[in-house]
Image: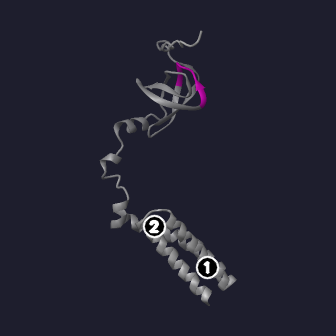
Amino acid sequence: MQFVFWTFVCLGVAVFLAAMELVVPSGMILFLAAVALIGSIVFAFYADVTFGAVYTVFLFVAVPFSLYYFMMWWTRSKMGKIILLDTEQDPALQPDEHTVLVKSLTGKTGIAKSKMMLSGLVEIDGQNFSAVSGVEVIDAGERIQVVKADGIEIIVRKIQGETASADYTIPPQIEDPFRG
């Protein structure tokens, strides 16, 4: 019967340590909470194999649900609002004009202004942007399409079979003084 007692003592310690992790975030406290939870499962199996199996299944169901509902409550609590960033009220966390512009580029086409061997310069709607082509090599003057634009990263791909219009000229390359 003492193993059942220690099962619930370890469970209480795990819950206490998990709550402490919210007040003093370190990661180590959460690790100790996980160790205490595993210890409670071990004690449950020492008490009785059937009790241990039922207890383990109960934890695998109860812990995720408890964490979900606790986090829903905690994010709305006074302490949660102090610790978590409120993106709607903090002007520093609002997207700026450039971020909004970059997000609007998805699906648009443009021209590679430099040879892109993973990254380079592209022109889209008359504006220059730094972009990434992935593993595809794109020559200067080839037509590109924006595959993804998120944050400050713009990912482009070459439009097969198309080159830039005749009025686009490739900028002159700088001579390498060390090449003979």
In this picture the colour scheme is one colour
Q: Position of residue 36 (x, y in %)?
A: 56, 74
Measuring from the top left, give residue 155's x and y in whole percent.
Answer: 52, 34
Residue 138 lies in the magenta-colored region:
yes
Q: Residue 81's image quarter? A: bottom left
Determine whether label 1 and label 2 are within 8 Å by CB: no
Q: Is residue 96 positioned above or below 83 on the image?
A: above
Instruction: Give, as a three-letter code, the residue at label 1.
Output: Tyr
- Residue position for label 1: 55
The one of 34 and 106 positioned closer to us in this rendering = 34
Compared to residue 151, the image places residue 31 above or below, namely below
Residue, far right: 49
Q: Which residues are magenta?
A: 135-143
Q: Judge whether residue 56 can be spotted in this image.
A: yes
| Within-10-Å neighbours for mark 1: few <14, some 14–19, many 20+ | some
**Amino acid type for the residue under numbered disc 2:** Glu
Residue 54 screen position, x and y as percent: 63, 80
Figure disc tally: 2
Quadrant assignment for the C terminus: top right
The quadrant holding residue 73 is bottom left
Residue 21: mark: 2
Position of residue 98 measured from the top left corner of the image (x, y, whole percent): 37, 35
On the picture, is 12 further left or further right than 81?
A: right
Q: Which SS does the magenta portion mostly show?
A: strand
| Residue at mark 1 to residue at mark 2: CA–CA distance | 24 Å
Residue 125 visible at all: no
- When the figure is inspected, residue 159 is found, relative to residue 82, above or below; the finding is above
